[in-house]
């Protein structure tokens, strides 16, 4: 039997249940569809395509080594599948379940309708701990952990099929805007495996203590997130690798504690992806209805531009944004701060700022991203407010201003005692005039105003009743499989310091 295996966010051959299932039944057409409409979406970017293109090149080599190279086709998914079916009459489509954005969900509905019309089975299998059509969160953690403990899927060889392989388009041909990202991570499975090995052998030993500061997190965090987001590595193989490392390091309490902490975040990764799987509207509507319309419907263009450019006049915030623009990655605490500053201090709508951050993240994963954007914007109704003080964060995470001076070189002449609040330096206007802006808001006053408005909404009739329904539907901290000895803390810190 000939099967078409549709690759999406699963760009590997190792531990690929969909490919293994199809290969066990006969010949395989391994296809990746480059969809211009997908790359035209407002959460897509050139840096993401560059990473995916490198993953596709590596996947093509790996599939060729098994006997059948990757087939690339560009166009609408239904039209591409229809042309391939007319030529090869494959008996089924096999793919992994995908928790993507609203566009990919709608596209899958169209593909499913076309397949039904053709009488063509479409078999979707899980590749993570996310569970389709989940009725209740009760028992979710146990089901997720059972999946992660299953043996990895293996493929020995593929039967060759005669079909042209196709070419990779350029970012320009996909009409993606120029997106310079000079320090972006390289795509492909080999780069992902190298990051995993270096993390478990050396870099991870300071994971817990170093993950919060952008000075140290670049090395101490695993840096696996883009490889997991686009499937160059499977979550299951990483979980099992971490389990082996924990076992091998018996007696090394410090190392094991760091590995346990990382393992808990892998579990939280699935927990938050499950939230979007259960309620796709998270991408566009506030989780708690009382928080809909929290921010003005008309965006303050001046504040938005300042935040996007790293020119808010808040040095640590600007340094983090410029770092993110140049690298495509930043540690989770700083991601949370960037979103919180936009939502609380600048009072910008989370849908607008969330899309900007999505484009900047090479490791953009919709299921995690939109849950976290809402958590850091106060719209869930079930999480404690975390309104970051941008000045305090700078003092805590970059006490000597090293990170600030590297990414905001305009502040090089500022004395150490004023680098986090240059507007307080008596000579600031004279030295910085035309080079670095004054703050676009008073951070203390803006935080007070945001806290007061959210408190007002939380005291409205029926607020807590709906909050209880949200918890029942999506689960709380207790629903996620965080180990008993893992580092505990606010839910906003238990996330993706990957």
Image (cartoon, helix red, strand yellow):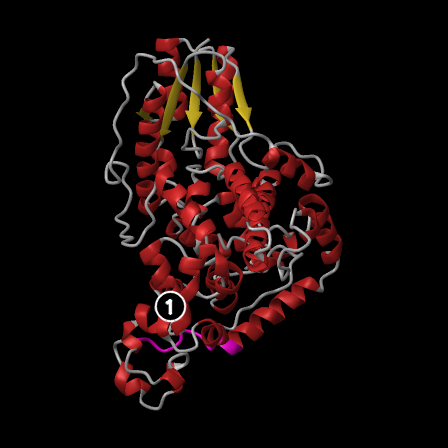
Q: Residue at x 72, y 52 (%)?
A: 466
Instruction: Let me know if residue 440 is in the magenta part.
Output: yes
| Residue 280 screen position, x and y as percent | 56, 40
Q: Is residue 70 visible?
A: no
Q: Is residue 459 visible?
A: yes
Q: Residue at x 45, y 22 (%)?
A: 155
Q: Is residue 326 above or below residue 406?
A: above
Instruction: Let me know if residue 125 is in the magenta part.
Output: no
- Predominant secondary structure, magenta span: loop
Q: Is residue 121 above or below residue 220?
A: above
Q: Residue at x 64, y 52 (%)?
A: 289
Q: Is residue 490 left or right of residue 65?
A: right
| Residue 46 screen position, x and y as percent | 31, 45
Magenta stretch bounds: 436-444
Q: Is residue 117 above or below residue 312?
A: above
Q: Residue at x 35, y 91 (%)?
A: 426
| Residue 190 screen position, x and y as percent | 36, 39
- In front here: 138 or 457? 138
Q: Is residue 18 left or right of residue 301?
A: right
Q: How many marks?
A: 1
In this view, which residue lies farthest toward the bottom? 426
| Residue 88 screen position, x and y as percent | 37, 10
- In front here: 456 or 136? 136
Q: Residues within 10 Å of mark 1 (few under 14, many from 20)?
A: many
Residue 42 falls in image quadrant: top left
Residue located beneath label 1 in the image: 318
- In front here: 343 or 362? 362
Q: Is residue 111 left or right of residue 149?
A: left
Q: Is residue 464 left or right of residue 333?
A: right
């Amino acid at each position: 039997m000939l099967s078409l295996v549709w690759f999406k966010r699963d760009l590997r051959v190792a531990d690929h249940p969909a490919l293994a299932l199809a290969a066990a039944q006969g010949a395989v057409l391994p296809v990746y569809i480059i969809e211009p409409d997908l790359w035209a979406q407002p959460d897509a970017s050139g840096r993401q395509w560059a990473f995916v293109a490198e993953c596709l090149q590596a996947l093509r080599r790996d599939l060729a080594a098994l006997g059948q190279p990757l087939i690339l086709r560009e166009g609408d998914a239904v039209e591409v599948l229809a042309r391939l079916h007319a030529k090869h009459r494959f008996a089924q489509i096999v793919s992994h379940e995908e928790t993507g954005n609203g566009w990919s969900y709608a596209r899958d509905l169209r593909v499913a309708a076309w397949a039904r019309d053709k009488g063509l089975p479409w078999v979707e299998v899980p590749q993570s701990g996310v569970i389709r059509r989940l009725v209740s969160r009760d028992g979710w953690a146990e089901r997720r952990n059972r999946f992660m403990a299953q043996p990895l899927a293996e493929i020995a060889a593929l039967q060759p099929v005669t079909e042209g392989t196709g070419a990779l388009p350029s970012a320009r041909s996909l009409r993606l805007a120029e997106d310079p990202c000079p320090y972006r991570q390289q795509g492909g499975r080999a780069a992902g495996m190298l990051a995993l090995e270096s993390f478990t052998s050396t870099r991870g030993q300071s994971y817990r203590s170093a993950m919060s500061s952008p000075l140290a997190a670049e090395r101490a965090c695993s840096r696996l997130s883009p490889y997991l987001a686009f499937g160059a590595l499977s979550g299951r193989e990483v979980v099992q690798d971490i389990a082996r490392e924990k076992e091998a390091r018996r007696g090394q309490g410090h190392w094991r504690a760091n590995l346990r902490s990382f393992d808990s975040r892998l579990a939280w990764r699935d927990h938050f992806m499950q939230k979007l799987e259960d309620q796709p509207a998270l991408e566009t509507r506030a989780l708690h209805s009382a928080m809909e319309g929290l921010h003005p419907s008309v965006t303050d263009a001046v504040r938005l531009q300042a935040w996007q450019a790293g020119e808010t006049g808040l040095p640590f915030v600007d340094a983090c944004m410029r770092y993110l623009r140049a690298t495509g990655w930043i540690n989770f605490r700083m991601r949370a701060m960037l979103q919180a500053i936009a939502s609380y201090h600048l009072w910008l709508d989370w849908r607008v700022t969330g899309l900007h951050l999505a484009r900047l993240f090479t490791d953009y994963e919709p299921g995690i991203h939109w849950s976290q954007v809402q958590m850091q914007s106060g719209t869930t109704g079930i999480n404690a407010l975390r309104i970051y003080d941008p000045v305090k964060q700078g003092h805590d995470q970059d006490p000597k201003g090293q990170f600030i001076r590297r990414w905001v070189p305009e502040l090089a002449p500022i004395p150490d005692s004023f680098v986090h609040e240059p507007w307080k330096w008596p000579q600031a206007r004279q030295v910085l005039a035309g080079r670095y802006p004054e703050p676009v808001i008073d951070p203390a006053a803006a935080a007070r105003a945001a806290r007061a408005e959210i408190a007002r909404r939380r005291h409205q009739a029926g607020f807590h009743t709906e909050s209880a329904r949200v918890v029942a539907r999506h689960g709380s901290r207790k629903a996620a499989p965080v180990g008993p000895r893992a580092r505990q803390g606010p839910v906003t810190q238990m996330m993706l310091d990957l």
